[in-house]
Amino acid sequence: MRNENSFELRILFRSARTAVLEIVDGGRYETLRPYRICVNGEAPFETKRTINNLFGLKPDSAVTVRVRPAASPEEAGTEGCPDEGREEVSVSFHTEYESVSLNVKDFGAKGDGVSDDTLFLQTAVWACPKDGRVVVPAGTYRFTCLQLKSFLKLHLEKGAVLKAFTDEARLPLLPGTVSYYDETDEYNLGSWEGNPLPMRMPLVSGLNAENILLSGEGIIDGAASHENWWRKERVKALPARPRLFFLSHCRNVAVQGLCFQNSPSWTIHPYFSEELAFYGTRVFNPAISPNTDGLDPESCSDVRIVGMHFSLGDDCIAIKSGKIYMARKLHTPSQKMIIRQCLLENGHGAVTIGSEIAGGVRDVTVEDCIFRHTDRGLRIKTRRGRGKDSVLDAISFRRIDMEEVLTPFVINSFYYCDPDGHTSYVSDRSAFPVDERTPSIGKVCFEQIDCRGAHVRAVHIEGLPENKIEEAVFRNVSIRMSDRPQKGLAAMAEGVEESCAGGMFIRNVHRLVLDHVQIEGTTGPACDLDQIDRIEEGHS
């Protein structure tokens, strides 16, 4: 067992000039106390983040990082590295090789906030050789869209802003599908809401590329507002609004640092990609911005989302795997995902699975995170029609703190999306025949979770009567309702009535485990359980 004053260091990622350092002391997103970090004997800096991006390293060089607690405010202002003999932990590693570093201003980019720098930025990217990097110094660089390539490192220095133009006519199109010459297959480019549909070219994109690193302390700004992209909130016409950052059929892509903001639609959208990592990245969109999900991995595998901060107008993280056309054609689930040490706030859902999950989702772990002021905390949404390949299984949420979340836990098998969302086929609580259109939910586990200030309902779980949720486990879960709870809908489904400080509502589950579950402050029954085949209770 770790001593309450001890801590560990881990290097999660390194490149030629950057690294990611984790301070492990039991904190979630923030460490339990402030620390001072010293890199190679240089002046230290103070942090309270568990995940810390290190920039400005030298290529192909030895690096030693020394960390100790900041003992006092007076010490935090002193110069020099931590004194020898004090409580201290160090870690060493070697940076990677770098061939050249290209400055976009040497290619003609002005960064004056007025000129169109698209051509100069893109030329620097295409000119960069393998093992090289492109550097964007401080300044505001207006651009239309920027396409990444394989073996690229793109670094935005502090004060650098890539700010998009918002003239729709200037953006190229990505067709949804293009038929092969021999008509044996299709080439898929564009995507919208789980279907291969035409879309406006994403503002920053990687198509069929590998080994990419985006890093730095700069900003990628979609410049969206209600005067341009967001005014089309209810318009379903194609081509669809662009993503801010889109990866299609890419492999081994890392994003370290950076801030993504004011996206026209989904902010970061990896699509049929693998080996992805996001470290200490920020995603900020206004609370009133429509469809501005933070990070939506769709039919992706081996994804690490670590130390990120989300604050936006829709779901913070939404894991997807397409609608039934893509699922039947490509059979590609989203799988092997780890989300940890993140702060997710002000969105509709903190971590959402669905609703476009016809390809299935499995092996997802969410741990050591903080959810604040979201409508729902841990949210699964599906419906009849997603299909037999829509299998959700091995979903684990553990060591989560929730604050002022309207409904902390939601599993909704009657989500009323799509044109047929309000039909009886989707909404009827009677048992339908199980066929090729029927989705399924396997094992879902919630452990060591503390929810303070819930409003609408503590738990809303409703499986399909014809295909019940296999297993739902609640272990060491505490939910305290707000002293002034708001009234609202716990789940977006026909037949769900508004509630206020409601308790645990669970329907259609084969095995339900309630072990050390505590619910306080409800206005009605703490538990409303029905159609549960087997209930195992601990000290609840």
Image (cartoon, grey):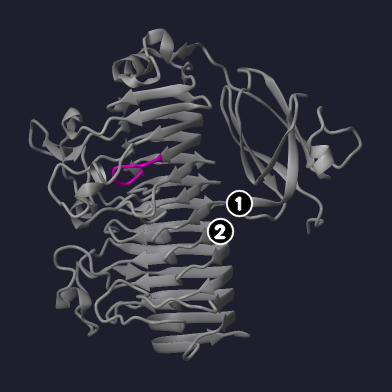
Q: How many tags in the picture?
A: 2
In the rendered image, which quarter is residue 85 located in?
top right
In the rendered image, which quarter is residue 515 located in?
bottom right
For the point 57% across and 63% down, which residue is it? 400
Instruction: Provide the secondary structure element on which disc 2 rests.
Output: strand
For the point 47% across and 35% down, which residue is it? 255
Residue furthest bottom in the image:
525
Which numbered disc covers residue 273?
none
The residue nearer to you, when weighing 484 against 380, is: 484
What residue range appears in magenta?
261-267
In this view, 127 is above or below 335: above
Asked if residue 326 shows in the view, the reply is yes
Other-residue count near label 2 (Cα within 10 Å), few / some / many at <14 / 14–19 / ≥20: many
Residue assigned mark 1: 29
Task: Please provide percent x and percent y for residue 144.
Answer: 27, 27
Using residue 63 as the reference point, say whether residue 387 is left or right of it.
left
Asked if residue 150 shows in the view, the reply is no
Q: Earlier in the sequence, mark 1 or mark 2?
A: 1
In this view, 336 is above or below 417: above
Instruction: Provide the secondary structure element on which disc 1 rests.
Output: loop
Name the amino acid, label 2. Answer: Ile
Task: Please provide percent x and percent y for residue 295.
Answer: 40, 47
In the rendered image, which quarter is residue 187 located in?
top left
Residue furthest right in the image:
85
Circles 1, 2 touching at the beta carbon (< 8 Å): yes
> Would you say residue 123 sits in the magenta stretch?
no
In this view, 261 is above or below 456: above
Residue assigned mark 2: 370
Name the amino acid, label 1. Answer: Tyr
